Image (cartoon, helix red, strand yellow):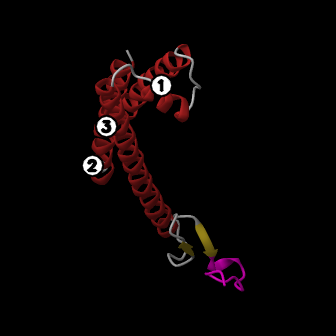
Amino acid sequence: MLDKLLREELAGIEALQTLLQQEYHALRSRDVASLERLAREKQASADQLRGLDSARTAYVQQQGFAADRHGLQACVNAAPTCQEQAILQKLLAELESAAEQARNQNEINGAVIAASRGHIEQMLAIVSGRDSLEFLYGHDSRKVYNAGSGGGHTIGKA
């Protein structure tokens, strides 16, 4: 049963990873229609993953283990045969790797969004007649210095 749950969760994370990659390409090409569609699909994927996580957690608890990472590992280690234990361990490793890849892609997408936001804010400053050099941004696209605010501010921290 645990192998079935882990396989379903792995498939769900891989599907989310695919959506995140599609989102990246849609962000880069500024494809609003695709971004709207992907937002709905990502939400459905996240809902499915929450359900699978709950099912796995419930199963692990039913087997008498804690509902955490250590409990899951203990449940894997308690498999009746070495072969089953090896299969579960492989699935768990694949699941962790896929989750890390999805997390990394999500961070990349967030950086693309932050950069786009910074460019939009700069364009709005230019369009509204403010000096385009009025705003300087840090690596996270947050305003760190406003040249029109009276000066005396340092751009970097000592």
- Residue 128, image x and y in percent? 52, 65
Is 150 in the magenta?
Answer: yes
For mark 3, give the secondary structure.
helix
For mark 1, give the secondary structure.
helix
Residue range of the region highlighted in magenta in the rendering: 146-158
- Say whether disc 1 or disc 2 marks the residue closer to the N-terminus: 2
Kindly identify which residue carries mark 1: 75
Q: CA distance from mark 3 to mark 1?
A: 31 Å
- Residue 67, quarter of picture: top right
- Residue 90, quarter of picture: top left
Kindly identify which residue carries mark 2: 25
Kindly identify which residue carries mark 3: 19
- Say whether disc 3 or disc 2 marks the residue closer to the N-terminus: 3
On the rendered structure, is 117 left or right of 97? right
Q: For the residue marked with disc 3, what is the amino acid?
A: Leu
Residue 33 showing in the rendered view = no
